[in-house]
Image (tube, grey):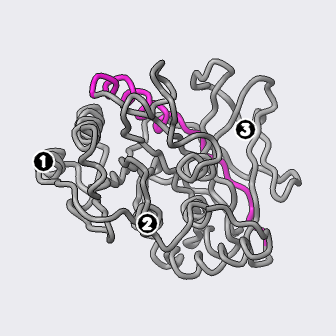
Amino acid sequence: MRISSARSFRLALILLAALLIPPLTAVHAQDQSRPTFKSSVAVVPISALVRDSRNHIVRNLGRADFQVLEQGQPRRIVDFKARNDAPLSVAFLFDTSGSMGVAFNLEKGKEFVQQFLSRMDPTLDEAALFTFHRTLRQEVPFTKDRDRIHQALNRVRPWGLTSLYDAVAETSKRLADRPSLHRAVVVISDGVDTSSALTSAEVSAVASAIDVPVYVVAVVSPLDDPNQTLSVAPKFSPGSGLSDLAQWTGGDLLYVSGVEQTDGMTNELLTAMRQQYFLAIESSSAPGWYSLEVRTKRPGLTVRARSGYFAGETTRVVGDSLW
């Protein structure tokens, strides 16, 4: 559902941030995997992924190649990092509602998660498994033990209604204080939300406010996959709830209509997560929601990044350590 009034939308975002985003005191002062900046100024961290016109990931860019706009106005980039070797923290959010039992969607989703786990580095990366239908359930807390997630995944059975957007908001909150530099929510769902209290726009605001990209893996039949020649009515066209959710948080939307697709897609997604750039700008002093746009100064490149932040809520300051 879209919010028609910009004023009421902004008010809803502020209220959601107050309810759902963890306080700054939850940030661990001893986190060593996040960049450390020598400053006492509150900053806003921004994760960014850059692609060229052929959708290839672009590497080897520097600070001077980027521009950050806040409310349409240029902001100075106070720090910049480009790392592809940082640990990953991935929260898998698996839809267990009754509709997942249709068209082998459950099997496709399980195969995607298993393939993704097999590509993660067991010495560095961590993952957690959450399931949802009407409510969110943590099946496995964050761990480097992939077998625990495999075992829990094998016990998953479809039943109940779908509260997709509520589950995404809560899972994003669980990721807020993870120490890893690269963090993401990976949603595996057929996308049929029947009982959420929050809208996709509200959830996107919460997730982007804490710089957590949401990657949506839409498990569908070939008829609902726009990448298939047999497609007749794709569920997740641009402007739909799930498409907006991925875009506004700096994530992406992927389609899986057959288990044979999972190998290439998991490799693509994992590569994207590891090739992010990390920028920081000074936070505005006045409380409220501020829109963000990240650009490159090189022509033909596009950037995926968070759509905004809440001043006073999303900056991470612990002494002289930011982020």
Query: Disc 1 versus disc 3: distance between alpha carbons?
Result: 44 Å
Residue 134 percent across, percent down from the top left: 33, 70
Callout in the foreground (1, 2): 1
Looking at the rendered image, the quarter that the C terminus falls into is: bottom right
- Up-down relation of residue 280 to residue 124 (above or below): below
Magenta region: which residues?
Answer: 259-284
Query: What amino acid is labelled 2 in the image?
Result: Asp
Query: What amino acid is labelled 3 in the image?
Result: Arg
- Up-down relation of residue 319 to residue 38 (above or below): below
Please report whichever mark, 1 or 2, sits nearer to the chain's N-terminal start: 1
Is residue 25 at all visible to an observer of this figure?
yes
Quadrant in the rendering for residue 284: bottom right
- Residue occupying image coordinates x 68% and y 54%: 307
The residue at which mark 2 appears reads as: 177
The residue at which mark 1 appears reads as: 154
- Residue occupying image coordinates x 53% and y 81%: 19
Residue 89 percent across, percent down from the top left: 37, 51
Query: Disc 2 versus disc 3: distance between alpha carbons?
Result: 26 Å
Query: Disc 1 versus disc 2: distance between alpha carbons?
Result: 28 Å
The residue at which mark 3 appears reads as: 63
- Within-10-Å neighbours for mark 1: few <14, some 14–19, many 20+: few
